[in-house]
Amino acid sequence: IKNIGVFTSGGDAPGMNAAIRAVVRTALYHDLQVTGIRRGYEGMINGEYEPMNRKSVSNIIQRGGTILKSARSEEFKTPEGRKLAYYQLKKHKVDALVAIGGDGTFTGARLLGEEYGIPVIGLPGTIDNDLIGTDYTIGYDTAINTVINAVDKIRDTAESHDRLFIVEVMGRDSGLIALRTGVASGAEVVLIPESSEDLPALLHRLEHGRKDKSSRIVMVAEGDREGGAFEIGNIVKEKFPQIDTRVSILGHIQRGGKPTCMDRVLASQVGFAAVEALKAGRKGEMAGIINGEITFTPFDQACKKNSHKLDANMVKLVEILSL
Ligand code: ATP
């Protein structure tokens, strides 16, 4: 290989820039060319390619978002769209790719590899931590720290007014952010898509639990149910009108901000590993870290849903520590 294309795709995540930097600098170290592809698969199809040098990635390791921008592309989901992408890659003499994103991005990367033989290595770039083949994804650590910083502030006002706050965090299919931040912020109960017993548990707790609590935090993953935190808020308000209940949706602040040290280091390690892997002839895999070891997982395995089985001990921990 002579020229590696790098792009970010799907939802952005803090630490993507650190990953881009690691890919570019490692490739240049090996005297390979690097081409940045802007706006994910959208830009791959539309010809948004730019050569990258050491300077292109100066002073970005600490920046959130992605300098290459991200996008979602419906066109790339079609065989015609991928054909256009392939022609553009050929035109720009890109002969290998590093794809930074989540499971959708890897599904696309797998198809491009299978249909056109382009070697692709993926990097886990998503705040959700919902991929197999890595203990943590790039952006997850930053996102959970953003959440607990916000919930600490909510706790101050909840405490001053003796309120119960239902806080909604990201996670359409996964309760990992909610569960971990629930433990870290002393939540009463965590409501997650993986469990159907959590709402009854909350109602039971409010009915029979301690009555002398001045503030309560309930953490909800956005995908827990239709209507999310507002729906839960309505149920609680109806059953317990005496409890002053408020809802707070944290929303997109969870995606932004400076990546934590953990995310920068993870992104740098897997970015380096991706280029080394392409040089060694690997393809069709995601580079992750399990128990401190760089690990390669085929795209179709990495994308399996409900990958990180929820740790039942963590659910129990929330319950016991908030009694
Ligand atoms: P996140 O987990 O943060 O949402 P993601 O990579 O899963 O990230 P998606 O929007 O699901 O984000 O996917 C990103 C892009 O990957 C899509 O816009 C599309 O271009 C491509 N993609 C997704 N699914 C497929 C598919 N089945 N076939 C081909 N391409 C796909």
Image (cartoon, helix red, strand yellow):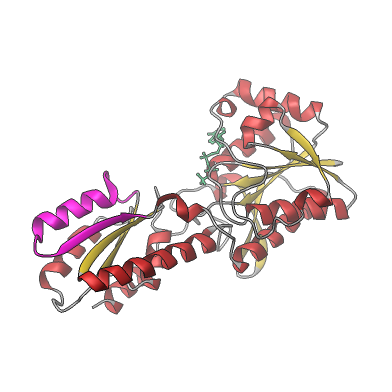
As drawn, the residue found furthest toward the top would be 80
Residue 70 vs residue 161, the one in the foreground: 161
**Quick one: 291 or 193, which is closer to the camera?**
193
Residue 16 coordinates in the image, percent (x, y): 63, 52
Residue 197 visible? The answer is no
**Magenta stretch: residue 232 in it?**
yes
Q: Quadrant of residue 88?
A: top right
* Place of residue 268 in the rendered image (x, y in percent of width and height, measured from the top left): 70, 60
Image spot of residue 218 (x, y percent)? 28, 64
Tell me if residue 271 can be seen: yes
Start-end of magenta stretch:
223-249
Q: Is residue 115 above or below residue 29?
A: above
Can residue 305 be found in the magenta stretch? Answer: no
Q: Classify the position of the N terminus by image quarter.
A: top right
- Residue at x 72%, y 27% (from the top left corner): 47
Q: Looking at this rendering, what residue extends furthest in the right direction?
A: 31
The part of the image, by quadrant, that contains residue 310 is: bottom left
Q: Nearer the viewer, residue 119 or 258?
A: 258
Q: Is residue 144 left or right of residue 3?
A: left
